[in-house]
Amino acid sequence: MSLRDANVVIIETSRTHIRAVLGLHELLKTPSVEFHARVGLRKSGEGNNGEASSSSKPTAQVNDYLVGLQLDEALAGPDAQDIEVSWPFLTGEVTNWVQAEALWKHVLFTHLQRKRTVNESPVLITLPSPTPSRTLYERTCQIFFERFNVPAFAILDRPLAQLYAANSLSGVVVDIGEDLTEITPINEGVLVHSAKLQTRVGTRMCRHYLAHLLKGNSSVMQTLFPGGAADQAQVHSTLLRLADYLVYAGLIKPPSSGEAAPPPEDEGVTDIAAVVVAGREKAVIESGMKKKLNAKASAAEQARAREIEALDLATVEFEGREITVGKERHRFCEPIFDPAVVDKLGLERFGSGAGEWVGRGEEGLPPLKAEGRKVEALQDAVGRAVGQADTDMRQYLWQGLFVTGDVTRFVKGIGVSLQSRLSPFIASSGLDTDIQPRTIRVLNVPEYYAEYRETGNGYSAFLGSSIVAKIIFNDHNAKNYLSKADYTAKGPHGIIEMSPSLL
């Protein structure tokens, strides 16, 4: 059977989000579908199908769950307290298969408008599991063939997809999430399971840390709360939204001692074709306009501009107010590299009670419990992960340091920042000269993926999945996917033998 690129579906399943797209094009597209990987169930009253529902999870059916926009609207309504929210992938494993099926069904049949009776869309999916098992593969495969009637199916390990996006087969994938950062060494396209690590640092603690720093900025506080604010929870919630705004606006730089010097100003465009191919025409036009404006500016205006540039101030429009923030915004990533800065403030500052980083906040995620042990800094965890790999493998791992995660879409340069902090692990390895790692090379998504040029490394898992899908679904002899005929003959176990993760 011929599998057309236009019908291929890519589904990226992470701990907190689901992303998808229909069709593979000459220029690989970014996700057309993106929503939180959560479901809602009404504790009383009617379910999603109009029938009486029960809050008892074992008896809930797929159609009882609210998903996507329907769930968002319900949580914003007056009956939000009557909805029980679950995140079936949050632990990295599938904690409830009915909820997982509800999410995947919503993607295929609601967003992508596939028809179960005549489903002609092969599916490639990535899963968030740090240690994928045969049971996970087989159960997922069974759902897609028997419940969704797909003509072909493939599973790709998420870290492999991320590294493939950087055009590499060996390296260390550092995936920064909300509450956890997963570190996965990969050698020649094979996961080094014995060296995989997690550290309990993530963007959520960074957001709350930046909110605390902004609270110390008197200009910000006077602008947001001119009459003062007695409710500290309201203050922190508002500052959290401001912190998110600064991140999404791309106004954050990670602290680094190894960043390259800023590029010199353009002296003029000599090769227009090269500029267009590189996608820099907009930047060149803006640079030329900036030069013209600077030439017309008075001496006082130029002095003021230089002063603002030195202070690194940024003025933003936030919730109807004009707010100016300073260099403290660049300390957003500090907790990743030095978790002690958060410990000094006390856990209770960020949570609803002792022992929690944060309570059930605006992001709707359940609280993360502290485990009573020291949180490991990112650079220490990466160094320890590589140190657990075989000695002759380490030099190849260090040649592919790839930092990804949603935060890398907006905060550029975290990889370089991490690279500068990993130098001591190279110097102290004490290996023989032939296998002694000498440098650490930072990888990024290449710029020739035009659709991904402005997204940093944040969509790397999705890009890598699209690349693999374009290869395997057009190579019918290699059998790196499971067809419906194969599934009929071998059952769910067939996915173990026919998986692109085994490339």
Image: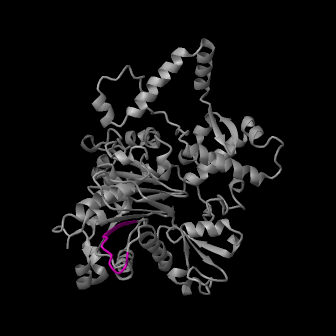
The quadrant of the rendering that contains the C terminus is bottom left
Near-viewer residue (118 or 189): 118
Residue 113 in picture, x, y percent from top left: 41, 70
Quadrant (top left/top right/bottom left/bottom right) for the N terminus: bottom left
Vertical arrangement, residue 375 with respect to residue 295, above or below: below
Q: Quadrant of residue 302?
A: top right
Q: In the image, is residue 415 above or below residue 50?
A: above
- Hey, which residue is sitting farthest left in the picture? 477
Colour pattern: one colour
The answer to whether any part of residue 142 appears in the image is: yes
Percent from the top left, x then y, of residue 447?
34, 42
Considering depth in this image, is 260 or 30 the residue closer to the camera? 30
Q: Is residue 389 visible?
A: no
Across and down, in percent, residue 58 comes to 55, 85
Residue at image position (19%, 64%) is: 475
The secondary structure that most of the magenta stretch takes on is loop
Q: Quadrant of residue 8?
A: bottom left
Identify the residue at image location x=47%, y=67%. Answer: 92
Confirm whether the magenta stretch covers residue 116: yes
Q: In the image, which residues are magenta? A: 115-126
| Total number of numbered discs in the rendering | 0
The residue sitting at 42% across, 32% down in the picture is 283
